[in-house]
Image (cartoon, grey):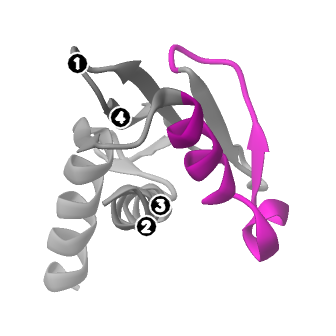
């Protein structure tokens, strides 16, 4: 039980932390790649949402989901900077975030797609 709780705390911390990826893709290509990371079979799990990012996706859930925000900005010279974080969350027990692992998996997938 304690191991599970520690794992959840780590997942929560990683979900709300901003993950930054710098890529050689131009901003328009980066937007397409990020949107594609939420497509296919995952499309039934995620929906567009409002939020502070260039792209904001909310995980569907019975009691509300987590919103992942992604900001895409051009880098000086060439390339793009992509920042990802959980902008809206459902908190349990004051410190655990529902669906934090889903955000972390999308962050990793987007990072792989952009590299």
> Disc 2 to disc 1, how far (Cα)?
26 Å
The quadrant where residue 11 appears: bottom left
Q: Residue at x 79, y 71 (%)?
A: 40
Nearer the observer, disc 1 or disc 3?
Answer: 1
Residue at mark 2:
109
Residue at mark 3:
106
Check whether the beta carbons of the residues at disc 3 and disc 2 lie within 8 A of each other. yes
Do we see residue 48 in this rendering? yes
Q: Which mark is residue 77?
A: 1
> Disc 4 to disc 1, how far (Cα)?
15 Å
The quadrant where residue 62 appears: bottom right
> Which numbered disc, 3 or 4, marks the residue that appears first in the sequence?
4
Do we see residue 65 in this rendering? no
Residue at mark 4:
82
Label 2 packing within 10 angstroms: few (<14), some (14-19), many (20+): some
Across and down, in percent, residue 115 comes to 30, 60
Label 1 packing within 10 angstroms: few (<14), some (14-19), many (20+): few
> Which numbered disc, 4 or 1, marks the residue that appears first in the sequence?
1
Q: Nearer the viewer, residue 60 or 62?
A: 60
Q: Is residue 5 left or right of residue 67?
A: left
Check whether the beta carbons of the residues at disc 2 and disc 1 lie within 8 A of each other. no
For mark 1, give the secondary structure. loop
């Amino acid at each position: 039980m304690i191991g599970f709780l520690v794992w959840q705390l780590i997942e929560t911390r990683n979900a709300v932390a901003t993950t930054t990826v710098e890529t050689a893709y131009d901003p328009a290509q980066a937007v397409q790649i990020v949107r594609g990371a939420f497509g296919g079979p995952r499309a039934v799990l995620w929906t567009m949402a409002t939020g502070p990012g260039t792209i904001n996706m909310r995980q569907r859930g019975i009691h509300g989901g987590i919103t992942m925000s992604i900001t895409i900005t051009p880098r000086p010279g060439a390339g793009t900077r992509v920042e990802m974080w959980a902008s809206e969350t459902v908190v349990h027990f004051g410190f655990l975030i529902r669906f934090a692992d889903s955000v972390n998996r999308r962050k990793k997938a987007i990072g792989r797609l952009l590299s």
